[in-house]
Every structure is written in C-alpha cells, then in structure tokens.
Image: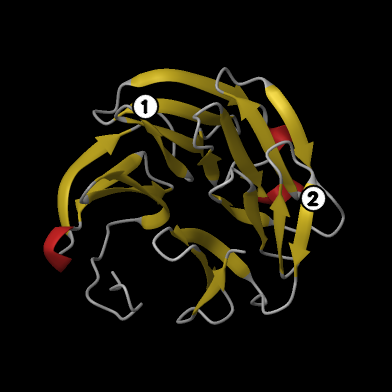
Amino acid sequence: MLNSSYEFITSYTLTGKPAGLCVVGDQEVAVSLLYYNTIQILSVGNNIISPVRTITTQHKCNGIAAAGKGEMFVTGDFDNNKYYWSLISMEGDVKSSQQFDASSGSYNNIAINRAKTRVYVTLSDMNTLLCFDMEGKNQFSYNPSNLKHPYGALFDRDDNIFVTGHGSSNIHHLSPDGSVIQVITTGVPKRPFAICMDKSRDMFIVTDMEEKRKIHMYRLK
C-alpha cells in the first residue's frame, strides 16, 4: 500500500500468487490468486491491510474487474485447457459464464468500461486484445504487429483504453471501438505490466517487470 505521495505504507503477504486486483468497496479490494480457485477480499482502511473473506471459484483465477452491483468479472481456466470469464457475486455465486477453447489463448487481464456494456480481455499468448459485449458476443479484436504480450488494460475518463505491451515495450491507447489513438513508446519501461488509474490526479501508473521496485507515472492530457 502507498500513500497519496506514492510512499510505502504497508504490505500484506498472500497465500498463492496474486494476479489481479480491483476495488470492490470504499475500503475493500478483491485479489485473484493465480493457479488457485480463490479470490481474497481485503480491507484496506486506516492504512492497514487485513483479510475479510475468501471466495472459492469454479475455475482458476487470473484477471479480475469490478462489474458494479456487488459483482465481479474473473478470467481463468480449467485443467482441460478451457478458458473462461465469469460474472460472480461477492459471495461467489456464478451469474453467467463464457467458455472459450484453447485456440483463443490464455485469458489474462480484464477491464470493463464505465457504462458496464463492454468487457475487454488481454490474451498475452496471442498478442491480442479482445472486446465482448456483456453477453459474450465478440465486438472486435486488436492484434497489430507492434503489440507483443499485452497484459494490463485500463480505461480513461472518456472510456478510451490503454493496453500495456509487455513484450513490445509500449502502451497502446485505443478508442472504445478499437481505433488507435496513439502508441506510447517514450518513457515506457522495457517490460510494462500492470496499469492502474489515479483518478484524483488524472494520472495512470505502470509497473515494470524489468525493474520490479519501480512504478512509472503518466499524466493524461
């Protein structure tokens, strides 16, 4: 946990490998644990991180995003190479689920637009960003030659989307329909990974898998 000046406050050790995180309440976050069928809900109030409850899912967990109305989208897979994204309640009840075969590649991160009408998923193995409607119908695919191993996905205030190119050392900035606004290369870390928004400052923050103790900050224009 960091303060508003991006200074370290505290940390919490999880059992498993944390893969995704989303805010699910004023003082609560949900963390997906990779290779486990588990989502950990954590309290982050008063500069203290503490466990609240654990949600068991039907498939392994990877990306996670808040869907509103006390629900979350989670990506993951079964052992039989079937990939899923599921809409689940905060109690772990499955509201809906979409299954995809292994030829689609492993589903990594997931993001949902502000209107809660579209789901965007990164497929790192396939160098692709996919967009679905809330019923799972494919809206578009984005896989240009200069996007390698996309991972992080983030919406800005206008519902444009940023995607980190973990293997191409860039950040792709797209309109809601997948048109390219810009490809950011200047000042981008060698291996950009996760991406999140500081809404109070109109800035987005990118983690670096090459230099793991650094974060990179960019101001929206």
Question: Which SS class for mark 1?
Answer: strand
Pick the quarter of the image with the N terminus: bottom left
Q: Is residue 208 visible?
A: no
Badge 1 amino acid: Ile
Residue where numbered disc 2 is placed: 180
* SS assignment at label 2: strand
Residue 216: horizontal and vertical position, in percent? 53, 76
Would you identify the image quadrant in which residue 152 lies? Answer: bottom right
Give the residue type that dot 2 points to.
Val
For the residue carrying disc 1, how many other residues have a C-alpha within 10 Å: few (<14), some (14-19), or many (20+)? many
Left-right relation of 30 to 193: left
Quadrant the C terminus occupies: bottom right
What x and y, as percent, mark residue 19? Answer: 44, 54
Q: What percent of the width, then of the height, locates residue 162?
A: 63, 54
- Compared across the picture, whether 43 is left or right of 35 comes to left
In the picture, the disc for residue 45 is none
Name the residue: 52% across, 61% down.
Answer: 194
Q: Residue at x 75, y 72 (%)?
A: 185
The residues bearing labels 1 and 2 have C-alpha atoms spaced at a distance of: 32 Å
Label 2 Cα crowd, 10 Å radius (few <14 / some 14-19 / many 20+) = some
Closer to the eye: label 1 or 2: 2
Name which residue lies at 45% across and 18% down: 96
Where residue 191 sits, quadrant-wise, is: bottom right
Q: Which residue is mark 1?
A: 88
Q: Please determine whether, in this image, residue 175 is positioned above or below residue 8.
A: above
Location of residue 115 in the rendering, given as x and y in whole percent from the top left corner: 50, 30
